[in-house]
């Protein structure tokens, strides 16, 4: 066991010594968010990665986020605390399967553009026309010409929600996030009943039955802005990854935030599965180790060049 405060001091020293900045997503442990130079949602962090002045970036999040940071900064060294921090959404859409499906649509004579959520591998990004995040999806979808169909990958729930808010019909890839997929509608209804006057906030990666009884739907940064804009102390029932509550409490301490529980897929029992196991692989120790040892590193791949063009036109 190592004292978190000692680790934080050590990380501060190593950052200077190694000329490094730390970027942390809102879903990693609060203590990592506290020592980060930049925190944010996927969109802000992708943009922040291009503004970093140091020669090394430590991306505390999941693999596709580190990959995007490398793609947008080929000359910088990009480290991630744990190479095994993946993403169930990204894994639900392998590049070879997407390529075959696109071929099939072309063979049918369909005229379409592929819009990918940023939660995809770089190999998938290189096969797409646009990359969206929860923060800019509506704006980007507005840039797809009206005479084109949209193939949206990989999140079916976000895709369905975007069809509803943009009025565009989409072909949806059947992927989903293992965290947002499992919120229990029954427990949410009970929590609403037990917390009179409370408001539900939810990420659009949640299924339709959750979003239907949600008061505010948005990506992590949009939710954060929303709770900051509400001045009256309120109880918010939070249907997103539970580490997000750390950022909410820091930004809007006047409120009470209650995590909505998930439900175990195999037994149907309520569980704390609103914590993303991939994000949870990030620990202070691993941040320290990767700064100290310079590994694991995201190494440039040939197909990053094609993914870069798509990311640049979509995010910058
Ligand atoms: P945003 O922070 O962009 O809303 O992304 C949520 C998410 O699931 C990241 O893995
Ligand atoms: Fe992927 Fe879901 Fe974890 Fe985000 S919360 S990294 S979408 S599995």
Image (tube, helix red, strand yellow):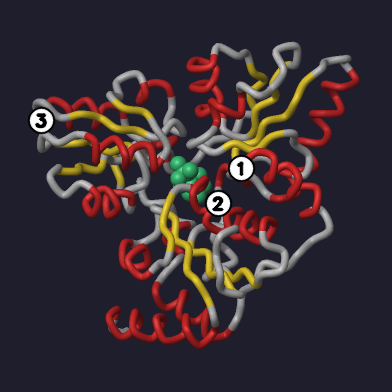
Mark 3 or 2, which is nearer the eye?
A: 2
Image quadrant where residue 181 sits: top left
Vertical arrangement, residue 143 with respect to residue 239, above or below: above
Which mark sits nearer the N-terminus, 3 or 1? Answer: 3
Q: Would you place residue 205 above or below residue 189 in this image?
A: below
Residue 75 image point, x, y percent: 71, 68
Local packing at callout 3 (Cα closer than 10 Å; few below 14, some 14-19, many 20+) is few
Quarter that holds the N terminus: bottom left
Closest to the observer: 7 or 38?
38
Contact? badges 1 and 2 (CB < 8 Å)? yes
Residue found at x 56% / y 27% = 139
The label number, if any, that marks residue 290 in the structure image: none
Q: Which residue is label 3 attached to?
A: 194
Percent x, y for residue 146?
A: 70, 13
Cβ(mark 2) to ligand 1 < 8 Å? no
Q: Which residue is label 1 attached to?
A: 315
Q: Earlier in the sequence, mark 3 or mark 2?
A: 2
- Estimate the spatial distance between the alpha carbons at disc 3 and disc 1, rounded to whole Å: 41 Å
Q: Is the residue 295 above or below the residue 189 in the image? A: below
Q: Is residue 221 left or right of residue 161?
A: left
Task: Classify 10 Å Cα crowding around label 2: few (below 14), some (14-19), many (20 and above).
Answer: some
Q: Secondary structure at mark 2?
A: helix
Do the residues under discs 3 and 1 have CB atoms within 8 angstroms? no
Is residue 170 toward the left or the right of residue 182 in the image?
Answer: right
Query: Looking at the image, which residue sits at the far right?
Result: 107
Q: What is the C-alpha distance between the residues marked 1 and 2?
A: 7 Å
How far, Cα to Cα, is label 3 from label 2? 40 Å
| SS category of the residue bearing label 3 | helix
Q: Which residue is mark 2?
A: 47
């Amino acid at each position: 066991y190592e004292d978190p405060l000692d680790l934080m001091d050590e990380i501060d020293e190593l950052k200077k010594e190694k000329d490094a900045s730390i970027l942390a997503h809102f879903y990693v442990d609060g203590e990592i968010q506290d020592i980060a130079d930049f925190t944010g949602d996927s969109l802000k962090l992708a943009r922040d990665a291009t503004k970093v002045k140091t020669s090394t970036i430590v991306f505390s999040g999941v693999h596709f986020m580190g990959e995007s940071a490398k793609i947008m900064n080929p000359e910088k060294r990009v480290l991630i605390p744990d190479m095994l921090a993946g993403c169930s959404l990204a894994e639900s859409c392998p590049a070879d399967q997407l390529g075959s499906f696109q071929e099939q649509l072309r063979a049918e004579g369909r005229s379409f553009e592929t819009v990918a959520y940023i939660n995809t591998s770089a190999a998938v990004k290189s096969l797409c026309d646009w990359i969206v995040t929860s923060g800019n999806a509506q704006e980007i979808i507005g840039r797809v010409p009206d005479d084109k169909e949209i193939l949206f990958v990989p999140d079916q729930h976000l895709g369905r929600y975007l069809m509803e808010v943009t009025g565009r019909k989409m072909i949806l890839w059947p992927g989903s996030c293992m965290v947002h997929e499992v919120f229990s509608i029954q427990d949410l209804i009970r929590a609403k009943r037990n917390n009179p006057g409370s408001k539900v906030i939810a990420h659009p990666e949640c299924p339709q039955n959750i979003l239907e009884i949600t008061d505010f739907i948005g990506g992590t940064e949009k939710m954060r802005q929303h709770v900051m804009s509400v001045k009256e102390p309120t109880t918010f029932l939070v249907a997103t990854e539970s580490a997000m509550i750390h950022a909410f409490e820091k930004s809007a301490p006047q409120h009470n935030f209650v995590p909505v529980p998930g439900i175990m897929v195999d037994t149907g029992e309520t569980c704390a599965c609103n914590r993303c196991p991939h994000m949870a692989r990030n620990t202070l120790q691993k941040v320290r180790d990767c700064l100290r040892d310079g590994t694991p590193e995201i190494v440039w791949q040939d197909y990053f060049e094609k993914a870069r063009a798509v990311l640049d036109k979509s995010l910058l």
